[in-house]
């Protein structure tokens, strides 16, 4: 298989992965209005864990658990759990597309944090990326707009934690396999969120359609992460990074189809500016590698 074919396949896999992530977000937004957040978060990570066990444990056995960086793996799982919880809170307050756009500030935060944490030099291009990112936030959260300020702050917190998640992933190094890392992320989220379920759940079981939708949370997450991992195995990250912002398109379409919401012109402009800032941050970082 030539490089062009591999890159094309990787791009298709990544597009499908991003659609899975957007469906996961839309499902969370739909469910969080009626069901306790701890129950949904636990279901998302537990079904993800079971999905990975069914898919990979028969072939990999104990290799799925083999890691030399267990504390860092657990920390990575905890950080992603916080991202999930913050996103779910934001979905209660804000439309799907706007939340997705604001959380895509994470590459900008990675740029800011990589200097002090990883010793990477922050270039002029990276500072410009940061300014673009925050200009996009101002467009979405402008004074007099309809966006809830608390929701914006929650999204910014989620973007910051997602940046920490990405930096921890870098720190794991090449010695850790992608599937093992994904499994520990799911298992950590499931175990840590479990104690909160009895405190939040009133004992009433959801109707079958909603129960199936709750059970699907981890499946969408598991399939999405599997396709995402496969895509980055087939093509260089620098080739795929610009495609990540297709998730903004998926989120806008699902927000319209499921929730009958289309962003206004200021929010669209803000999303585009954030995407440009994030792309600049990613591409500036690739040129240094």
Image (cartoon, grey):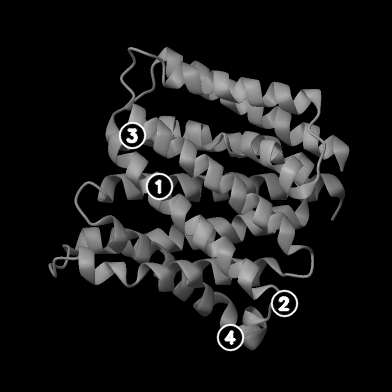
Residue at x 49% of width, y 50% of height = 20
Q: Which of marks 1 and 3 is nearer the N terminus?
A: 1
Quarter of the image for the C terminus: give it: top right
Q: Which of marks 1 and 4 is nearer the N terminus?
A: 4
How far is disc 2 from disc 1 in space, using C-alphas?
29 Å
Q: Name the residue under label 1.
A: 86
| Residue 169 picture location, percent across and down | 67, 57
Q: Which of marks 4 and 3 is nearer the N terminus?
A: 4
Which numbered mark, 4 or 2, is in the foreground of this view?
A: 2
| Residue 65 picture location, percent across and down | 62, 81
Q: Nearer the viewer, residue 239 or 186?
A: 186
Q: Mark 4 points at which residue?
A: 58
- Residue 233 lies, with reference to residue 154, above or below; the image says below
| Residue 109 picture location, percent across and down | 62, 37
Q: Mark number for residue 68?
A: 2
How far is disc 4 from disc 2 in space, using C-alphas?
22 Å
Residue at x 40% of width, y 39% of height = 154
How far is disc 1 from disc 3 in space, using C-alphas?
24 Å
Query: Dot 1 lies on which element?
Result: helix
Query: Dot 4 lies on which element?
Result: helix
How far is disc 4 from disc 3 in space, using C-alphas?
39 Å
- Residue 151 lies, with reference to residue 180, above or below; the image says above
Horizontal placement of 174 versus 254: left or right?
A: right
Horizontal placement of 143 versus 284: left or right?
A: left
Q: Residues within 10 Å of mark 3 (few under 14, many from 20)?
A: few
Q: Name the residue under label 3.
A: 257
């Amino acid at each position: 298989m030539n490089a062009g074919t591999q890159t094309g396949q990787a791009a298709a896999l990544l597009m499908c992965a991003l659609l899975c992530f957007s469906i996961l977000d839309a499902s969370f937004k739909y469910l969080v209005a009626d069901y306790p957040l701890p129950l949904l978060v636990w279901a998302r990570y537990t079904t993800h864990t079971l999905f990975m066990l069914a898919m990979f444990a028969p072939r990999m056995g104990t290799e799925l658990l083999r890691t030399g960086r267990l504390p860092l793996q657990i920390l990575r799982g905890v950080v992603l759990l916080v991202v999930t919880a913050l996103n779910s809170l934001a979905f209660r307050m804000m439309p799907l597309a706007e939340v997705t756009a604001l959380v895509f500030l994470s590459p900008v935060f990675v740029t800011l944090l990589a200097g002090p944490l990883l010793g990477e030099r922050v270039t002029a291009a990276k500072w410009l990326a940061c300014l673009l990112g925050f200009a996009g936030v101002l467009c979405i959260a402008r004074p007099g707009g309809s966006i809830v300020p608390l929701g914006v702050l929650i999204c910014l917190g989620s973007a910051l934690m997602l940046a920490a998640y990405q930096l921890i992933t870098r720190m794991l190094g090449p010695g850790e396999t992608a599937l093992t890392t994904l499994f520990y992320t799911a298992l950590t989220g499931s175990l840590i969120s479990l104690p909160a379920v009895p405190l939040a759940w009133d004992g009433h079981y959801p109707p079958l359609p909603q129960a199936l939708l709750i059970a699907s949370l981890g499946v969408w997450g598991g399939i999405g992460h599997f396709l995402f991992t496969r895509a980055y195995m087939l093509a260089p990250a620098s080739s795929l990074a610009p495609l990540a912002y297709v998730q903004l398109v998926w989120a806008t379409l699902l927000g319209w189809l499921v929730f009958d919401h289309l962003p206004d012109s200021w929010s669209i402009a803000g999303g585009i500016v954030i995407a440009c800032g994030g792309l600049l941050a990613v591409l500036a970082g690739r040129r240094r590698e």
